[in-house]
């Protein structure tokens, strides 16, 4: 069960961030602003993906440096700087 959930979460991440055509088309149909639609789409995967959508959105963030450049050792990648 956990492996299935991880696979669905990976697919959901790809849906949210991929530039591939399938993701662009599905995002245009299923994502409204920062949230996903909750009505049924005829897809065997969508019911699992919409359950994980908020989990992915609420537990991911990109914070790298000041947005101008990246300092590998001093930027906070996973909490504290590496040095």
Image (spheres, helix red, strand yellow):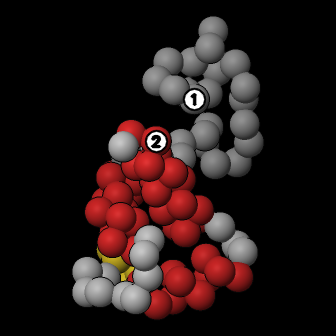
Q: Nearer the viewer, mark 1 or mark 2?
A: 2
Residue at image position (33%, 52%) is 55
Label 2 crowd (10 A; few <14 / some 14-19 / many >=20)? few
User: Would residue 1 appear left or right of 26 to someone viewing this image?
Assistant: left
Q: Residue at x 53, y 47 (%)?
A: 62
Within the image, what quadrant is residue 18 found in? Answer: bottom right
Vertical comparison of 24 with 83: above or below? below
Instruction: Work out whether 10 lies above or below 80.
Output: below
Query: Quarter holding the C terminus?
Result: top right
13 with respect to 50 (left or right): right
Q: Residue placed farthest to the top in the image? A: 83
Residue 9 x, y percent position in the rendering: 46, 53
Whether residue 68 is visible here, answered yes or no, is: yes
Q: Quadrant of residue 76?
A: top right
Residue marked by disc 2: 3
- At label 1, counting other C-alpha atoms closer than 10 Å, the crowd grade (few under 14, some 14-19, many 20 or more) is some
């Amino acid at each position: 069960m956990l492996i299935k959930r991880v696979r669905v979460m990976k697919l959901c991440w790809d849906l949210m961030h991929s530039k591939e055509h399938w993701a662009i088309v599905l995002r245009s149909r299923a994502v409204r602003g920062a949230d996903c639609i909750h009505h049924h789409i005829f897809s065997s995967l969508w019911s699992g993906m919409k359950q994980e959508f908020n989990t992915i959105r609420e537990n991911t963030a990109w914070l790298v440096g000041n947005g101008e450049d990246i300092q590998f050792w001093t930027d906070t990648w996973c909490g504290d700087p590496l040095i």
